[in-house]
Each structure stands twice: as C-alpha cells, then as structure tokens.
Image (tube, helix red, strand yellow):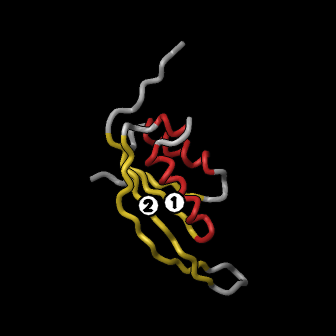
Amino acid sequence: MSERRTIFIGKKPLHAYVRAVVMAMEQGDRQIQLVARGATIGRAVDVAEVCRRRNGIIAQGLPNEVVIGDIACSSETIEEEGKRARVVSVLSIDLDGIGEMPTQEEE
C-alpha cells in the first residue's frame, strides 16, 4: 500500500482545506490523511464531513464517494525554547476517494 498524502489542518478557512483535498485527489492521491492538533481538531472533523457528503461547490470536484477510514487520537509534547513543555491532542482522519472523478465540462 502506498503512503497516504498528509494535509495538516490549521487556522485557514474550511474551504481552503476542502480544496486541498480536491486538488490532491485530482493529482491521483486517492488516500488522504488529515492531521490536526489542539484547537484545530474541530475544523479537521468538519473538513472530513464536507468531503464525505460532497457538500458545496468545491467538494463537487471529489470522486463519486469519499469514505472516512481510520480515526486516530493521540497526544504530542511540544517543547518551545524558554517555555515549559506542553501536551497537545492530535487527531488523524483517513479519507479514501472511491470512484471516478467528475469531468470538467468546457463551455
């Protein structure tokens, strides 16, 4: 099995990450992993659900079916120079694109 393409979820708007998933799948990467830490975990869940439902104009560029696979929850210790180490939660969500990509109709 090939490696999953990883998309790190940050503070950009939701549609930016949905577009990143669409672009990755257009380039042939049908196995995606969304990774979020701390406060951005909710955004990662939203991205996964928008992609699964193919909800919105941007998500219409996804394959016929997007399946949410494994979901892993863990924690990481972040050490910053001059500051105390802190522990943050990490969520990983696997997405698999199944089926044909929609064709782009030229006008």
Do the numbered discs 1 and 2 sit on residues whose CB atoms are within 8 Å?
yes
Residue 75 coordinates in the image, percent (x, y):
50, 78
Q: Amino acid at mark 2?
A: Ile
Q: Residues within 10 Å of mark 1 (few under 14, many from 20)?
A: some
Q: Which residue is farthest left?
A: 1
| CA gap, disc 1 and disc 2 | 8 Å
Residue under numbered circle 1? 45
Whole-percent x, y for residue 95 in the image: 40, 52
The relative height of residue 31 versus residue 22 in the rendered view (above or below) is: below
Q: Secondary structure at mark 1?
A: helix
User: What residue sits 54% from the left and 56% below the top?
Assistant: 46
Quarter holding the C terminus is top right
Q: Position of residue 9 (x, y in %)?
A: 57, 58
Marks counted in the figure total: 2
Per the image, the residue denoted by label 2 is: 93
Amino acid beneath label 1: Val
Residue 25 position by quadrant: top left
The circle on residue 63 is none
Q: Earlier in the sequence, mark 1 or mark 2?
A: 1
At x 47%, y 42%, the residue is 54
Dot 2 crowding, Cα within 10 Å, few <14, some 14–19, many 20+: many
Image vertical order of residue 77 relative to residue 105, above or below? below
